[in-house]
């Protein structure tokens, strides 16, 4: 509650009353002895309501004072369009910062008749020998054909960004195919350790699963063994049917 110098014993209330849609954008700053503010100034208001207006560019009109502007900026609601714009800017900024730390890339729209070795040969031929430490090409247990996508983890964010630009739009396949490779950041798993934790206890590591169906690890261009599971690994299933067993 506020008190005016003239009526120091009478409490008054300050509120902002939006103007009607057909009027210039602005608010009424009203001081009233009433307990609530109405759309129009009350008849027994201690002081006459004062207008604070803003031009279309977010400024204020010449007849508003600094105190009026401060009150209006504090109490006036933020336009929805501005909220959406700020949220978009924050999201793009977060994506840009996140891309500087990402190392795992997803390759999409790959030829289904490509094998793991064929893809690794292709990646090496593009200049990435020794620059990745994880690779996984999912294969259908029934058809024994690739599912058309793969995951690869590069050893550094810089290598990942170069790889992203190099393979995105690639179409020079060694086998006849009209597919054009698309590259995206892997989500939610990112990084070498994350993928080890994801697959070391996976049914893919069951003894009955052939090596070509499994993810593989590398160090300086040479394949290294996958860390052993930390619990009993179940055989792969598709629905209620056990696969490859």
Image (spheres, grey):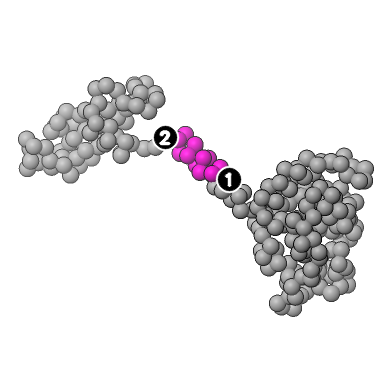
User: Element type at marker 1?
Assistant: helix
Please give left or right for residue 131 compared with residue 84 in the image. right
- At 14% from the left and 31% from the top, the residue drawn is 47
Q: In the image, residue 201 lies at what x, y percent? A: 73, 72
Residue appearing at x 77%, y 58% in the figure: 130
Give the image quarter of residue 137: bottom right
In the rendering, at what x and y percent does residue 116 appear?
86, 57
Calculate the distance from the C-alpha at mark 1 to the C-alpha at mark 2.
26 Å
Q: Is residue 15 above or below residue 220?
A: above
Q: State the extent of the magenta-drawn residues as a range.
A: 80-93
Q: Which element is circle 2 on?
A: loop
Q: Is residue 127 left or right of residue 32?
A: right
**Residue at which label 2 appears:** 79
Instruction: For the N terminus, give its image quadrant.
Output: top left
Indicate the quadrant containing the C terminus: top left, top right, bottom left or bottom right: bottom right
Residue 32 placed where, x, y %?
A: 17, 36
**Residue drawn at x 84%, y 74% as measured from the top left:** 207
Q: Which residue is mark 1?
A: 96
User: Foreground residue, 35 or 231?
Assistant: 231
């Amino acid at each position: 509650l506020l008190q005016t110098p003239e009526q120091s014993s009478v409490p008054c209330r300050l509120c902002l009353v939006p103007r009607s849609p057909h009027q210039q954008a602005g608010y009424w700053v009203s001081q009233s002895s009433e307990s609530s503010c109405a759309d129009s100034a009350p008849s027994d208001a201690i002081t006459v309501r004062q207008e604070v207006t803003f031009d279309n560019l977010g400024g204020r009109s010449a007849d508003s004072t600094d105190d009026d502007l401060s009150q209006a900026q504090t109490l006036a609601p933020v336009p929805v369009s501005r909220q959406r714009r700020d949220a978009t800017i924050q999201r793009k900024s977060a994506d840009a910062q996140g891309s500087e730390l990402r190392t795992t890339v997803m390759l999409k729209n790959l030829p289904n008749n490509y094998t793991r070795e064929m893809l690794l040969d292709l990646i090496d031929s593009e200049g990435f020998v020794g620059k990745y430490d994880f690779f996984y090409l999912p294969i259908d247990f029934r058809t024994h054909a690739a599912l058309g996508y793969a995951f690869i983890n590069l050893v550094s964010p810089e290598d990942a960004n170069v790889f992203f630009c190099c393979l995105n739009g690639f179409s020079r396949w060694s086998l006849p195919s009209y597919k054009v490779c698309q590259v995206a950041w892997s989500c939610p798993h990112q990084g070498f350790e994350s993928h080890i934790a994801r697959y070391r206890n996976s049914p893919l590591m069951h003894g009955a699963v052939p090596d070509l169906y499994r993810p593989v690890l590398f160090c300086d261009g040479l394949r290294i063994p996958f860390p052993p599971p930390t619990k009993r690994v179940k055989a792969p299933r598709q629905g209620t049917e056990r696969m490859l067993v």
